[in-house]
Image (tube, helix red, strand yellow):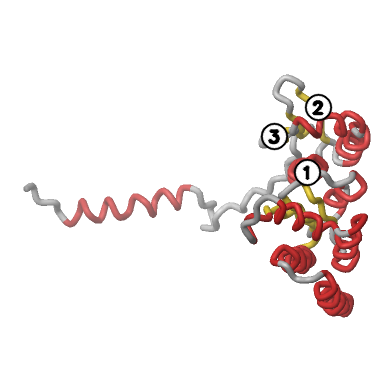
Amino acid sequence: MPKVSRKEDAKEAAQPLQSVLVGMDVEGQLPEKPTFEKLAAGDGGQRLEFRRVPVPQHRMTPLKNTWMQLYEPITKNLKLDMRMNLKTKKVEIKTTPATPSPDLLQKAADFVHAFLLGFEVRDAIALLRLDDLYVEGFEIKDVKTLRGEHLARCIGRLAGKSGKTKFTIENSTRTRIVLADTRIHILGSFQNIRVARDAICALIMGSPPGKVYSKLRTVAGRLDHS
């Protein structure tokens, strides 16, 4: 194995130091860091982004009837492009050079997705205006395994007579709830979703509505003071 002299080691150690000194000015100070302006979505430094939201078959007609109510907030307020692809049955949303922030693309996709889950436009549009709103979904079988008439009675217990139970939970927890067969979707803030989910789970497990109402009244009062 060939021996390496101490002089060669010293030369190799000095090379990184010399490369740093090349960038220094005469007084021995490093040059100032460059400052760059913020890029918009359409600038060369950031490519245009897409989101595709699949449309279930049973939501095609409601989407067609309320298309302009979805289209105008997304294109006028968020400065995004939006179209319906009839071949793939997906709503396509894309950023434009005028889009203020790329984060708005995800907000628009969540807004369309919430409508396709069954929420009304006036409720789903809150996702565009507020930052701390979410949509959470779960199935009845995730809480308790029910079949046949037991499952049908459970769904009826969640809705109540003329939707009374569902409306009571919505108003007391400041959320919106969609009962889509055996699947349940909740729109609201994180804390309110948790309260509504606990009430729905109690009803699924078989608690009488009166007991759930009294517990909701206590929790709703606590939410008002917080």
Is 20 in front, or is 169?
A: 169
Disc assigned to residue 49: 3
Could you tell me residue 160's position as x and y percent? 86, 59
Rounded to the nearest angstrom, the CA distance separating label 1 from label 3 is 24 Å
- Mark 1 or 3: in front is 1
Between 44 and 142, which is closer to the camera in this rendering?
142
Is residue 221 something one can see in this rendering?
Answer: yes
| Residue most extreme to the front | 149
Left or right of residue 47, residue 224 in this image? right
- Does label 2 or label 1 sit earlier along the sequence? 2
Q: Mark 2 highlights which residue?
A: 83
Q: What residue type is labelled 2?
A: Arg
Q: What element carries label 3?
A: loop
Where residue 118 appears, as percent x and y from the top left, is 82, 44
- Please identify, in this view, whether the residue under mark 2 or under mark 1 is nearer the observer: 1
- Residue count near mark 3 (Cα–Cα under 10 Å), binned few <14, some 14–19, many ≥20: few
